Image (cartoon, rainbow, N blue to C red):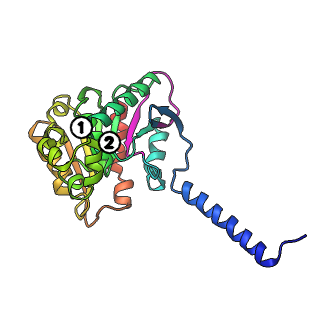
């Protein structure tokens, strides 16, 4: 017995709704199939290039949240892979550079080295991923080949404290009063000397109209301090652009050339 027309319509609508949800869940992902592996309570991924042997070059990307990397990254990911540079990351969720999150990233680093990847990856931090990567980098300067950023959060007193306080305090396991008393010892912009001494170059692309992660509170202050320490730092400022998906950030020839060159060293 056939269903009445209105029942059929409801079934078709339900099916289309399910398909739409599935599409929404996966459409944001890159059109590449990553190798995934479990790392304790976290998950690692690798988009593998055609490289073999030991010391395989790689770029360590953060944040690896459900939407990242996404299609906006395709241009530079394709170019990395074409040059034999893999892209990898470790998803810890919304972390802000706490000692606990740094420890997990260190385990991920050792796992990548165990898998034959270089002991000196290029770190790439986009937005809040910048804080994740720089917090790890300042504690492991001899394990960093270079630091790259796309409008990265680098200063705990900027976006984390002004716009994202709850997640920041949760990551450090403190209330505001307790965290305020120790913030400077955890703020990576205060601990750049080791990276400068290790001659780790920095290359960042950042918009001068970014109101969410202001250039002057993050990339500019890091570059100024780093240069005073004798380090190499370059900021490509994208005029008139804010915290957004734009070719000026995700198709930066200077940034991709920097990552490819430094990955090979």
Q: Position of residue 192 (x, y in %)?
A: 16, 37
Count of numbered labels shown in the rendering: 2
Secondary structure under the numbered disc 1 in the rendered image: loop
Q: Residue at x 39, y 37 (%)?
A: 59
Q: Position of residue 64 (x, y in %)?
A: 42, 45
State which quarter of the image contains the N terminus: bottom right
In the displayed structure image, the side of residue 211 where residue 9 appears, left or right: right
Q: Is residue 158 above or below residue 120?
A: below
C-beta proximity under 8 Å, tags 2 and 1: yes
Depth check, front residue: 36 or 262: 36
Q: Marks 2/1: CA distance?
A: 9 Å
Is residue 251 visible in the rendered image? The answer is no
Quarter residue 113 falls in: top left
The mark that comes first in sequence, 2 or 1, is 1
Which stretch appears magenta?
A: 44-64
State which quarter of the image contains the C terminus: top left
Badge 1 density bin: few <14, some 14–19, many ≥20, Cα 10 Å = many
Quarter residue 206 falls in: bottom left
Depth check, front residue: 248 or 216: 216
Q: Nearer the viewer, mark 2 or mark 1?
A: 1
Q: Position of residue 211 (x, y in %)?
A: 24, 64
Depth check, front residue: 186 or 46: 186
Residue 140 in magenta stretch? no
Q: Which mark is residue 121?
A: none
Q: Which residue is mark 1?
A: 201
Is residue 143 visible in the rendered image? The answer is yes
Q: Which residue is mark 2?
A: 258
């Amino acid at each position: 017995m056939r269903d009445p027309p209105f029942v059929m319509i409801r079934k078709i609508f339900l099916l289309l709704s399910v398909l739409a949800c599935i599409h929404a869940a996966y459409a944001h992902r890159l059109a590449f199939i990553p190798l995934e592996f479990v790392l304790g309570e976290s998950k690692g991924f690798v988009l593998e290039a055609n490289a073999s042997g030991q010391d395989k070059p790689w770029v360590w990307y953060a944040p690896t949240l459900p939407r990242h990397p996404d299609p906006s990254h395709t241009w530079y990911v394709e170019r990395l892979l074409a040059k034999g540079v893999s892209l990898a990351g470790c998803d810890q969720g919304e972390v802000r550079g706490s000692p606990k999150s740094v420890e997990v990233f260190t385990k991920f680093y050792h796992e990548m080295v165990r898998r034959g990847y270089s002991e000196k990856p290029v770190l790439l931090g986009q937005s809040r991923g910048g804080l994740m990567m720089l917090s790890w980098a300042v504690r492991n300067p001899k394990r960093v080949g270079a630091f790259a950023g796309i409008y990265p959060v680098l200063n705990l007193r900027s976006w984390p404290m002004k716009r994202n306080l709850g997640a920041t305090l949760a990551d450090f396991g403190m209330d505001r009063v307790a965290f305020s008393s120790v913030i400077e010892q955890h703020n990576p912009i205060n601990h750049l000397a080791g990276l400068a001494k290790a001659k780790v170059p920095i290359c960042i692309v950042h918009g001068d109209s970014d109101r969410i992660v202001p250039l002057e509170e993050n990339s500019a202050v890091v570059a100024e301090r780093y240069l005073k320490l004798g380090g190499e730092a370059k900021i490509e400022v994208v005029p008139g652009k804010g915290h957004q998906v734009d070719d000026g950030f995700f198709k930066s020839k200077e940034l991709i050339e920097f990552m490819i060159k430094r990955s090979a060293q």
